[in-house]
């Protein structure tokens, strides 16, 4: 990983960890609920989505402090989705982020509510910025986040994923799942950065295309890691896709072709980026990191 990206990621991960902790600890709620929310939120995820938001701000020349709450909101929604995805009613997983899943520690009822708590608290955080963000920008961000995380976005993708279990899916069906279940929240993170930067609609659309390629590459890499990844590095069990007879890029196209798809999406993302924003080192390097990641 490039040294400048390493520094950027480390600094932003630290900032996010502190901000997320502070934000959840301030909530006036039953102690078990706060504990359960904190358990998953502070379990050391990569913070890729908020880092994409902050990197977009950096490339567009905006004070990163302006995006702190939006970045935290995106990570809270991502964490809620992981808690719910791990539940017995969905993937029924025992490990996540290197520790027991939320429901294994707190029980199913509390895990559902911790997810609900993170989802709703995300919007509370987003609408209470500590720096100067104009009210119409906040409304725009609420609109985007609820759209991309909601039924037309991530939730819809998750439904298609569940309905597709034990079926053999067409490439189009699989692409729909990847685009919504995984790519939409990454796309949303980049779009929130563009909204905060008050870019033109055209630039926002170009950045959306960039982020879509990144999101698709990320999910295909996830399919690959589920097949050949290291459980220790990933912090969760591998092989579950095969076990659950899920259609993935690996099952549809084989490992080598899946790797070629990742490389192709990253190349398309980087070509777009070079055209849209020539001074975009951090986003460019982040794209490279997405191919090289092992966790
Ligand atoms: C429950 C509405 C709802 C949605 C769930 C995110 C998701 C949708 C399911 C998670 C299942 C999964 C493994 C998806 C693959 C891509 C993905 C989101 C991986 C986990 O994200 P990382 O690698 O995790 O960024 P960390 O822990 O680093 O944050």
Image (cartoon, grey):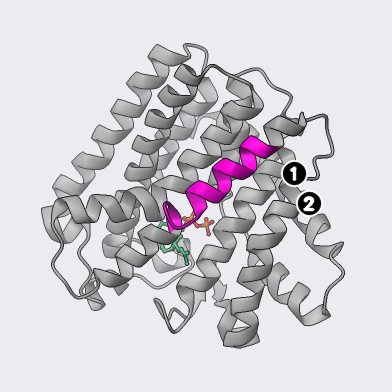
Instruction: From the viewer's side, name the closer residue of 9 and 92.
Output: 92
Q: Which residue is the site of mark 1?
A: 15
Q: Can you give x and y, in whole percent of width and height, for residue 150 in the image?
A: 49, 56
Q: Which residue is the site of mark 2?
A: 18
Q: Secondary structure at mark 1?
A: helix
Task: Kindly tell me whether residue 294 is visible in this rendering.
Answer: no
CA gap, disc 1 to disc 2? 5 Å
Residue at image coords 24%, 68%: 164
| Quarter containing the C terminus | bottom left
Q: Secondary structure at mark 2?
A: helix
156 relative to 61, above or below = below
Label pair 1/2, CB-CB below 8 angstroms = yes
120 relative to 102, above or below = above
Q: Can you give x and y, in whole percent of width and height, for residue 152 in the image?
A: 41, 52
Magenta stretch: give its range.
Answer: 139-154
Q: Can you give x and y, in whole percent of width and height, for residue 260 in the image?
A: 19, 40
């Amino acid at each position: 990983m490039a040294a400048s990206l390493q520094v950027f990621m480390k600094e932003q991960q630290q900032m996010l960890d502190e901000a997320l902790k502070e934000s959840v600890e301030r909530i006036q709620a039953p102690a078990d609920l706060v504990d359960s929310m904190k358990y998953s939120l502070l379990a050391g995820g990569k913070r890729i989505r908020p880092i994409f938001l902050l990197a977009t701000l950096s490339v567009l020349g905006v004070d990163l402090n302006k995006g702190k709450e939006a970045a935290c909101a995106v990570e809270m929604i991502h964490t809620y989705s992981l808690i719910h995805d791990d539940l017995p009613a969905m993937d029924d997983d025992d490990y996540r982020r290197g520790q027991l899943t939320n429901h294994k520690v707190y029980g199913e009822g509390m895990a559902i509510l911790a997810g609900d708590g993170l989802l709703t608290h995300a919007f509370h955080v987003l609408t209470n910025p500590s720096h100067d963000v104009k009210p119409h920008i906040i409304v725009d961000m609420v609109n985007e986040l609820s759209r991309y995380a909601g039924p037309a976005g991530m939730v819809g993708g998750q439904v298609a994923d569940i309905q597709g279990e034990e079926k053999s899916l067409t490439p189009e069906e699989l692409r729909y799942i990847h685009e919504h279940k995984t790519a939409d929240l990454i796309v949303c993170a980049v779009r929130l950065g563009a909204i905060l930067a008050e870019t033109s609609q055209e630039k926002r659309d170009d950045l959306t295309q960039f982020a879509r390629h990144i999101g698709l590459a990320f999910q295909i890499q996830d399919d690959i890691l589920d097949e050949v990844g290291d459980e220790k590095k990933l912090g969760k069990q591998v092989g579950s896709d095969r076990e659950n007879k899920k259609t993935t890029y690996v099952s549809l196209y084989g490992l080598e072709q899946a790797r070629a798809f990742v490389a192709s999406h990253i190349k398309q993302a980087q070509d777009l980026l070079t055209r849209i924003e020539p001074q975009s080192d951090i986003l460019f390097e982040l794209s490279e990191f997405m191919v090289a990641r092992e966790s």
